Image: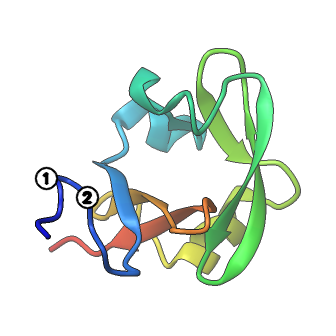
């Protein structure tokens, strides 16, 4: 039986979006969530995401900007191993429905 296009039978997580931070996001320590991901990351809510195996609660304002709600931005960046000038953020959805944020290292 053939698998449908875009459907994976493996246990690998699905990559929702790869995104670099804009200058404004870097300056204000916010991550903008594009409208196409508002079903997974609804504005005006709190969402729990996995970052390096640790669950972090993210606060999303009504305009779609998010940052960690229970920890400092610097702690979040260290946990992620993220350099906001070079690296790319990767939004992930796991097979069990959990959401995650990972870091893809830049040059």
Residue located 37% across and 62% down the image: 14
- In this rendered view, identify the residue nearer to me: 45 or 6: 6
Q: Position of residue 65 (x, y in %)?
A: 60, 29
Residue positioned most to the top: 63
Q: Nearer the viewer, residue 11 or 78?
A: 11
Q: Position of residue 82 (x, y in %)?
A: 45, 70
In the picture, which quadrant includes the N terminus?
bottom left
Residue corresponding to mark 2: 7
Dot 1 falls on a residue whose secondary structure is: loop
Residue under label 1? 5
The local secondary structure at tag 2 comes to: loop
- In the image, taking residue 70 as reference, residue 48 lies left or right, namely left
| Residue 93: image location, x then y, percent | 49, 59
Task: Please give the label number shown on residue 72.
Answer: none
Q: Residue at x 83, y 48 (%)?
A: 69
Mark pair 2, 1: CA separation: 6 Å
How crowded pointer 1 is (Cα within 10 Å; few <14, some 14-19, many 20+) is rated as few
User: To which quarter of the image does residue 49 belong?
Assistant: bottom right
Q: Are marks 2 and 1 in contact (CB under 8 Å)?
A: yes
In front here: 87 or 42?
A: 42
- Residue 74 or residue 11, whichever sits in front: 11
């Amino acid at each position: 039986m053939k698998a449908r296009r875009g459907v994976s039978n493996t246990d690998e997580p699905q990559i929702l979006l790869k995104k670099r931070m804009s200058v404004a996001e870097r300056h204000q320590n916010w991550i903008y969530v594009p409208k196409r991901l508002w079903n997974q990351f609804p504005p005006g809510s709190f969402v729990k995401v996995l970052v390096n195996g640790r669950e972090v609660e993210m606060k999303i304002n009504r305009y779609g900007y998010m940052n960690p709600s229970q920890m400092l931005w610097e702690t979040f960046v260290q946990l992620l191993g993220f350099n906001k000038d070079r690296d790319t953020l990767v939004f992930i959805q796991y097979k069990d429905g959990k959401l995650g944020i990972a870091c893809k290292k830049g040059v």
